[in-house]
Image (cartoon, rainbow, N blue to C red):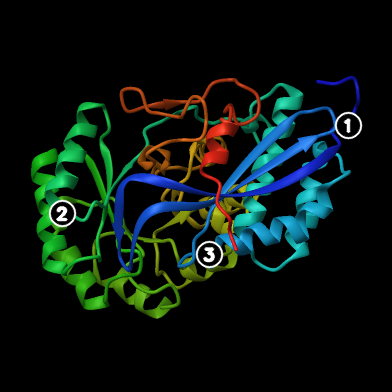
Amino acid sequence: MSNSPSLIIKSVEAIPVALPLKKSMHMAGVVISNAYNLIVRIETQNGMIGWGESASAPTMTGDLLPGMVAAVRDHLAPLLIGQDALHHAALMDKVSKEIYRNTGAKCAIECALLDLCGKALGIPVYDLIGGARRLCFNPMVLLGSGSSDEDLHDALSKQKMGIEFFKIKVGARPIQEDIAHTLRLRKELGPNTTLCADANMGLTSSETVAYCKTTESVNLLFFEQPLRSGNLNGMAQLASSISVPLCGDESITAIEDIISLSQAKAIQGVNLKIIKLGGISPVINAAYICESLGLSVNLACKVAESSIAAAALFHTGAVLPNLDWGISVTNQYLAEDIVLDPIRAIDGVVTLGRKPGLGIEVDEEKMRRFTIDAK
């Protein structure tokens, strides 16, 4: 670190990228072949660089990539330039109040600030945000190729690599096919593999009941967001009529939503994403509220984010009081990552070390190759 007691921000870049997936991900209502993400690059006067990332998410946060770029470039960057990055909490207070919503842009900025501060202080981000409760993770893998045979092949391959936790994407095909697919996965993967399912708001109440009751023998850990995000009463009625615990995802855009869903007994757990709540700090706050409400927590990236966002998620997961519904990062689905040493599981386990900041080094040449004109 420089002899200067401060870390003055010189520039804030909003970089739109299109990252190709190895193969398309089929979800209810959408097929994803490229990830349209915002990369934020913050550089200080002494030449240090911090990185952040957020995925655009039209059906979840409402964020479109051109809007994310404009939010950072025109509204949020001017708040930061000339300021001391070490005052990251105070800066994020200003950022959070400057514009309504735009949680993806705010998230990418906070991740970049924390990465920068960690590097300057020589400590990992998890030490900046509360201290680690866990450093080893058994991440889940998404199964959503659109083909039952391909999903099974992927799952068996991952199982040989030590992965024993899978989330099945449902709602993109007829419900009877989803049921048969889920039963087949349980039979082939064995009784000790953890399975859950995610409908991404793609089912009706009757389809959800049919799916959950017919797949009771699968013993799903949870079933995520079967109904549209605003259907609080429908989720509450489902929760009382099926044995599978319901997880809220798209229905959660703020901490108030968690409280409302819990009070209505519409969920037994939540999917927390840093892009939904506007950064790492709000997610940590939400996790403590979940703990007090007796809700389980699943922490996840959106499909698909690079190792920048994956690192941010693991550092967040390190400090949460409860992570009993697991963690899901999505850089593994990219054809190419944009960091020099991508985050990967070894024998099914990801272990955080003591590298400062987020612990990643961005390949700026590769990143620029994937940069697009977001207008």
Residue type, numbered disc 1:
Ser
Of the 4 image quadrants, the one containing the C terminus is bottom right
Q: Local crowd at mark 3 within 10 Å, few (<14), some, or many (≥20)?
A: many
Identify the mark nearer the N-term, 2 or 1: 1
Residue beneath the point at 52% across and 31% down = 339
Q: Is mark 3 on a helix, strand or loop?
A: loop
In this rendering, position of residue 160 left or right of residue 270? left
Disc 3 versus disc 2: distance between alpha carbons?
28 Å
- Asked whether the beta carbons under mark 3 and mark 2 sit within 8 Å of each other, the answer is no
- Asked whether the beta carbons under mark 2 and mark 1 sit within 8 Å of each other, the answer is no
Disc 2 versus disc 1: distance between alpha carbons?
54 Å
Q: Nearer the viewer, mark 2 or mark 1?
A: 1
> Eyeballing the image, is 26 above or below 311?
below
Res. 152 image quadrant: top left
Residue beneath the point at 81% across and 36% down = 86
What residue does disc 2 label? 182
Query: Which residue reaches farthest right?
Result: 4
Residue beneath the point at 52% across and 54% down = 290
Identify the mark nearer the N-term, 3 or 1: 1
Q: Where is residue 240 in the image (x, y as percent from the top left)?
A: 30, 71
Q: Where is residue 120 in the image (x, y as percent from the top left)?
A: 76, 26
In this rendering, position of residue 32 left or right of residue 171? right
What residue does disc 1 label? 6
Res. 153 image quadrant: top left
In depth, the one of 296 and 370 nearer the eye is 370
Residue type, numbered disc 2:
Thr
Q: Is mark 1 on a helix, strand or loop?
A: loop
Q: Where is residue 156 in the image (x, y as percent from the top left)?
A: 16, 35
Q: Local crowd at mark 1 within 10 Å, few (<14), some, or many (≥20)?
A: some
In this rendering, position of residue 320 left or right of residue 329? right
What residue does disc 3 label? 61
